[in-house]
Amino acid sequence: MIGHFLRRELRSLRLELEAYPDERLIWALPPGLPNSAGTLTLHLAGNLRHYVGAVLGGSGYVRNREEEFSARDLPLALLLESISEADAAIQSTLPSLSHAQLSQPYPEPIRERSLDTGDFLIQLAVHLAYHLGQVSYHRRLVTGDAQGVGALSPAELLTARPTLEPSE
């Protein structure tokens, strides 16, 4: 189930990036904002590819966190590819995890703490949603476009279904 939320947030991240009218604005850094949308995208994709793909899925991905925060002016196509790679890591790894595995400690310490794998996956989803909100704010700020992109629709939840109209 957590994979569904992670993938939904990644789709929203893609929509946010595609909503910039000029891809150079993705890298704009207005005063007071520490990260551009491009930086946050690289960070989120690297985070998921490492923690889900490499650690849980054995993908072999090697993370360069420093580069996530130092790279500049990469093309939109590369950012979208990084999102697709993070999505692929989720799709190839999470469905095969058992409930027992989710209750076991995550395979590596996180900030010198041992965490259950399921709890850490929830943390990854919250982290993704937090930075997704920052990307949305960044896009609205640098483009002047206050319109949303349809992110976080409750209709996309696994249990969403049409309501029955009351009989008259």
Image: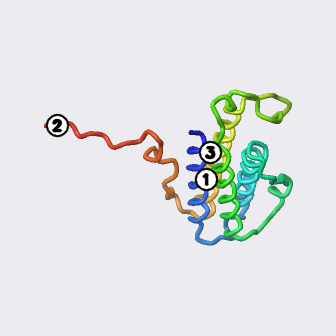
Give neighbour class at mark 3: few <14, some 14-19, many 20+ (Cα, 10 Å).
many
Q: Position of residue 24 (x, y in %)?
A: 69, 70
Q: Position of residue 15 (x, y in %)?
A: 56, 60
Task: Report the front residue among 154 and 140.
Answer: 154
Find residue 129 and report its image quarter. Answer: top right
143 vs 30, left or right, is left
Q: Residue at x 31, y 40 (%)?
A: 163
Disc 3 to disc 1, C-alpha distance: 9 Å
Q: Which residue is mark 2?
A: 167
Give neighbour class at mark 2: few <14, some 14-19, many 20+ (Cα, 10 Å).
few
Q: Residue at x 71, y 67 (%)?
A: 78
Q: Amino acid at mark 2?
A: Ser
What secondary structure is found at the residue carrying circle 2? loop
Residue 103 seen anywhere in this rendered image of the structure: yes
Q: Residue at x 45, y 44 (%)?
A: 154
154 vs 55, left or right, is left
Q: Amino acid at mark 3?
A: Ala
Disc 1 to disc 2, C-alpha distance: 39 Å
Q: Position of residue 152 (x, y in %)?
A: 51, 47
Residue 32 seen anywhere in this rendered image of the structure: no
* Residue 82, numbered circle: none
Q: Which residue is mark 3?
A: 129
Q: Amino acid at mark 1?
A: Leu
Q: Position of residue 25 (x, y in %)?
A: 67, 67
What secondary structure is found at the residue carrying circle 1? helix
Q: Quick one: label 1 or label 2, which is nearer the N terminus?
A: 1
Give neighbour class at mark 1: few <14, some 14-19, many 20+ (Cα, 10 Å).
many
Task: Report the front residue among 29 and 7.
Answer: 7
Q: Which residue is mark 1?
A: 10
Q: Quadrant of the N terminus?
A: top right
